[in-house]
Image: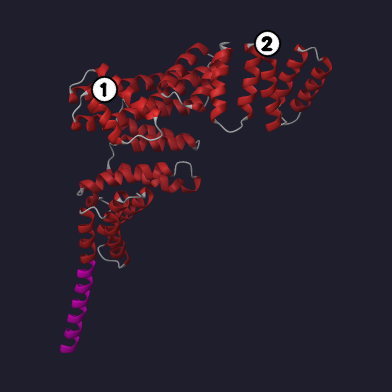
Amino acid sequence: MRRLVGLLGIGVMVTLAFAARGSHLLEGGKVHYRDGRYEKADTLFLKSIEKGLAVTESYMWHGKASIRMKKPDLIEAARAFLEVLKRDTTAEIIKKDEEAHDLAQIAFYYGAQKMLYEPSKADTLILFLRMGIKLDPKREQNYVLLGRFHLQNQELDEALDVAAELEKINPESPDVAYLKGRVNLIKGNKEEAVELFKVSTARFNTEIEKLKEGIGSQLGIEEEDIDKMVSAIEELEESRDSVSMDDKQKLLTEEFGLIPPQATAFLRWQSGYAGKNRQLSDAYNWLGKSYMENKKYPEADSALARSLELDPENINVMWDKALASYYLRKYKEAVELLKKVEASVEEDYLVHLWLGICYLKFDPKELDEAEKHLEKVIEIDENIADAYRNLAVIARERGEIKKASELLKKYDELIKKEGGN
């Protein structure tokens, strides 16, 4: 019996020794972490996990360190926080650590964003966003990204389910109307889509005005000055390949008289403001597309002009605006927009096809330019029937009747083929 008690005592001592060592690894990592030595800290957190000691807490600290390191790994951080939530389904350990809670939200959202165009990681993306929602059900960005992901994959019912969830959180969310508008447009409910995108753009505009009122009240500056500061930052960013936060802060302090804490607060606000404007631009773009589907070209042109004003370098909006301009017979404007698209994308037969068509409509003297683009279409894909038809128009204008006849014959052959364009 004494021998058994002795062996049990030794076993307890060994267990305590291992526990102490596990605690030593975790606590040592915390010291490095708090001193900003995140790589060293993470080495100890990983060792603690490997040895199976203080695993849940070690995973949490590993997640935090993965974001704080010189080369942040958002997906690894998200996986680490996911391991915490597998072991602690109430999420109490993360919720009690304010920094961990904030970093987990960042990891889940931006980790999911990195996987947005990787179909093989769809399940992981959805899981990350659902965990973000679990940690903070009122944070709207997770619903928005999840809804857009479902739209991207033509999962319309799932997108509507997410819109319904978001509507419970915020009935006035512009993204609720946006998601519903996208689904309705895909389903062919064109008029309903227009109304929903009108609601979405109106709500985004209201949110943006509230953002401006908020920063104006916080810093004691007028809306006119806010607009000037935003424009100055945008001009600075456009003038250089890279602009640091210090450069922007210097601009605000030297040219607009803000003190450093005000400049820091303004730059933090400006980041969110810019993101909201991109969302508004996207909503106007889809409003324009919806008007196009309804053949309401003046309304489409106005919506797309507003979208392009908010996001001047957006190639997709330029393309849609060019088509609206074409249908309004503003051929010169269509050509100018299409040339910008051409300069920004890889060889695309559609861009050259529409350039050829618009040059023909815009100026009969531009036959050579139109011909160049239409021949480029055939060089890219010789089965595009419309290229031959428009080349036939050029040949006829030049009096080359035989050539025009041959081109029209080729056009007819392609139209008769299955899949002819």
Residue 88 picture location, percent across and down: 27, 55
Image: magenta residue range: 2-22
Q: Is residue 53 above or below residue 119?
A: below
Q: Which residue is mark 2?
A: 364
Quarter of the rendering containing residue 116: top left
The residue nearer to you, when weighing 103 against 243, is: 243
Residue at the image position 20 percent from the left and 24 percent from the top:
257
Image-based side of 221 in relation to 379, left or right: left
Q: Classify 10 Å Cα crowding around label 1: few (below 14), some (14-19), many (20 and above).
A: some
Work out which quarter of the rendered image holds the C terminus and state it.
top right
Say if the magenta span includes residue 6.
yes
**Most extreme residue toward the front, as rendered?**
254
Q: Which mark is residue 212?
A: 1
* Residue found 23% across the figure and 30% down from its top: 263
Q: Which secondary structure lies at badge 2?
A: helix
Can you see residue 293?
A: no
Going from the N terminus, do you reach mark 2 or mark 1 first? 1
